[in-house]
């Protein structure tokens, strides 16, 4: 009895084993805490099973399809026949299975107790799973998010689907509508277009990827037009009818679109309903858990991390928040990283990678006269030309001050975000970056050239 009670009491009890929850578990174990990790589905959560990893696998298949289509340009005799969706899925699922095995083994090897089942917060230090109460000196909530819909828009899973359904399709539609021109919508539109699907994106806001810098938005819209990805922006979606042929979507201006299916990609809502959070006295806002900047909920020793905390819903933000909370509990006083300084990548073709303030936000913050920008066209970058890509890098600096925003678009530009986030987070001046050496010929060199231009000493620009 005593043993069983001890095995149900932890220093840190974490509800949800997705990116945020398992990162917290790993760091907590490393710091010497006893850790209980409650998971009702599969360790790895959305990112591993229904998000980052499967979508990037599909995007890689899409890249190979594009390579086959354009092979002749590079002197390679190859041709694109068709997409074998069961084989694409087998490749994708193989990656997920391998990573899942690795993660499960890692968690086990660190002595973390995984508790399988659906947990509910039943006290300030207690989570109950299938009638058993587990306690934690500290509780970390990490229950993640689900694909949202719009009021009155029913997800049937048949012809009106979410990304969860889109990731398991065994056949491709001929024509698809994508509702939402944000990250997930643009990624699926990009994959399907490469797979030969006729795609139209419907976005209520005035542009695709509306949170990106205006220069990047312009480039993406131009590139999507060139790829024949259609989009309608600036008019709200009114409704959709499913019929035997597919779907008919109507906008508020009366315009209609017909296709085989509609992918609803209008954002993700927090998984917090009926989990006892309100009863425990947590402050909630539209389902999100409100915390202070140190991710404490203000109640007992309860923290919240990941997609249930308002802000950017990204796996690496979840990892960082999970690690942060473990270190906070250990008294290490970790440094807060503001959402604006978290790198973002949209992995469509061309890729978008950004961190820090857009030009518009920088002008709002510092004033029109206190912001200087520099655009560097990737046409000047040898490696980008070799890859047959195009795009630009835009730097935003505070006048006579540091670089506060880096915005990039072009094939594979996601790989450049590492240096970009160091530049912004370490508040580097363009002159600092310009004096360092960037290897030739790399796409990374373009970031160095952009900084050189901003420092007043352009080389190839
Ligand atoms: C299609 C798609 C593509 C994406 N691509 C990217 C990308 O490229 N890069 C990126 O950074 N982010 C991406 N994301 C976002 C990323 O997946 C999320 O930000 C990340 O998974 C959030 O981590 P989390 O731990 O907060 O939540 P989740 O990963 O959702 O994990 C929450 C976990 O909690 C469990 N859980 C929930 N309630 C309970 C309960 N009551 N009891 C027990 N367990 C429970 C769930 O089963 C789940 O495993 C993508 C998302 C989607 C949908």
Image (tube, rainbow, N blue to C red):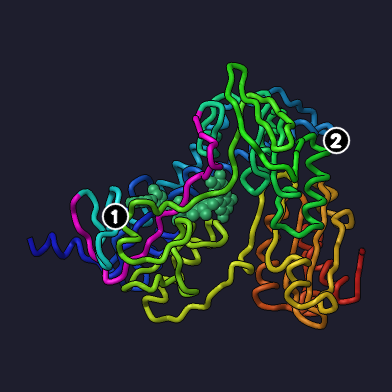
Where in the figure is residue 259, as x and y percent of width and height? 67, 25
Residue lying at 39% horizontally and 68% vertically, measured from the top left? 303
Element at label 1: strand
Image quadrant in which the C terminus is located: bottom right
For image coordinates 50% across by 30% down, the residue present is 157
On whether ligand 1 comes within 8 Å of the CB at mark 1, the answer is yes
Q: What is the x, y in percent for residue 248?
A: 65, 26
Task: Tell me which residue sits at (66%, 68%) in the image.
Answer: 421
Q: Is residue 84 visible?
A: no
Left or right: 220, with 324 as reference point: right
Q: Does 147 lie within the magenta span? A: yes
- SS class of the residue under badge 2? helix
Q: Is residue 101 left or right of residue 218?
A: left
Q: Quadrant of the N terminus?
A: bottom left
Q: Which residues are magenta?
A: 131-157
How crowded pointer 1 is (Cα within 10 Å; few <14, some 14-19, many 20+) is rated as many
In the image, is residue 238 part of the stretch drawn in magenta? no
Res. 212 image quadrant: bottom right
In the image, 198 versus 153, the foreground residue is 153
Q: Is residue 360 visible?
A: yes
Give the number of the mark in front: 1 or 2: 1
Q: CA distance from mark 1 to mark 2?
A: 58 Å
Q: Percent x, y for residue 288?
A: 46, 59
Q: Nearer the viewer, residue 241 or 372?
A: 241
Of the residues under marks 1 and 2, which one precedes in the sequence? 2
Residue lying at the far top of the rendered structure: 244
Q: Quadrant of residue 120?
A: bottom left
Indicate which disc residue 73 carries. 2
């Amino acid at each position: 009895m005593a043993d069983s009670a001890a095995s149900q009491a932890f220093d840190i009890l974490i509800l949800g084993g997705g990116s945020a929850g398992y990162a917290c578990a790993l760091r907590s174990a490393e710091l010497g805490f006893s850790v209980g990790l409650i998971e009702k589905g599969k360790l790895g959560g959305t990112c591993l099973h229904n998000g980052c990893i499967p979508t990037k696998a599909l995007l890689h298949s899409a890249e190979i399809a594009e390579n086959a289509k354009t092979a002749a340009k590079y002197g390679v005799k190859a041709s694109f026949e068709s997409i074998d969706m069961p084989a694409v899925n087998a490749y994708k699922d193989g990656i997920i299975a391998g990573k899942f095995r690795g993660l499960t083994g890692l968690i086990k090897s660190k002595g973390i107790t995984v508790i399988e089942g659906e947990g509910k917060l039943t006290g300030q230090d207690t989570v109950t799973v299938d009638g058993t109460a587990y306690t934690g000196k500290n509780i970390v909530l990490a229950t993640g998010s689900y694909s949202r819909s719009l009021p009155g828009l029913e997800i049937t899973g048949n012809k009106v689907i979410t990304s969860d359904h889109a990731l398991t399709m065994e056949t491709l539609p001929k024509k698809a509508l994508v509702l939402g021109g944000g990250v997930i919508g643009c990624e699926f539109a990009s994959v399907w277009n490469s797979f030969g699907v006729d795609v139209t994106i419907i976005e209520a806001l005035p542009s695709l990827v509306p949170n990106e810098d205006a220069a990047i938005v312009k480039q993406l819209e131009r590139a999507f037009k060139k790829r024949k990805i259609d989009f309608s922006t600036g008019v709200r979606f009114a409704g959709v009818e499913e019929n035997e042929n597919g779907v008919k979507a109507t906008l508020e201006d009366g315009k209609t679109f017909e296709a085989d299916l509609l992918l609803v990609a209008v954002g993700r809502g927090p998984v917090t309903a009926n989990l006892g959070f309100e009863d425990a006295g947590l402050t909630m806002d539209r389902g999100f858990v409100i915390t202070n900047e140190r991710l404490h909920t203000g109640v007992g020793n309860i923290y919240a991390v990941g997609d249930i905390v308002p802000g950017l819903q990204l796996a690496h933000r979840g990892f960082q928040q999970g690690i942060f909370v473990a270190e906070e509990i250990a008294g290490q006083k970790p440094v807060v990283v503001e959402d604006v300084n978290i790198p973002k990548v949209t992995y469509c073709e061309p890729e978008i990678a950004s961190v820090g303030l857009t030009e518009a936000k920088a002008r709002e913050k510092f004033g029109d006269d206190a912001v200087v920008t520099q655009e560097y066209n990737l046409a000047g970058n040898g490696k980008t030309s070799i890859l047959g890509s195009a795009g630009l890098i835009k730097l935003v600096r505070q006048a006579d001050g540091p670089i506060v925003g880096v915005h990039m678009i072009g094939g594979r530009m996601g790989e450049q975000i590492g240096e970009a986030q160091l530049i912004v987070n370490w508040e580097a001046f363009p002159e600092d970056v310009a004096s360092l050496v960037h290897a030739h010929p790399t796409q990374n060199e373009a970031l160095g050239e952009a900084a050189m231009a901003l420092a007043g000493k352009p080389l190839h620009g």
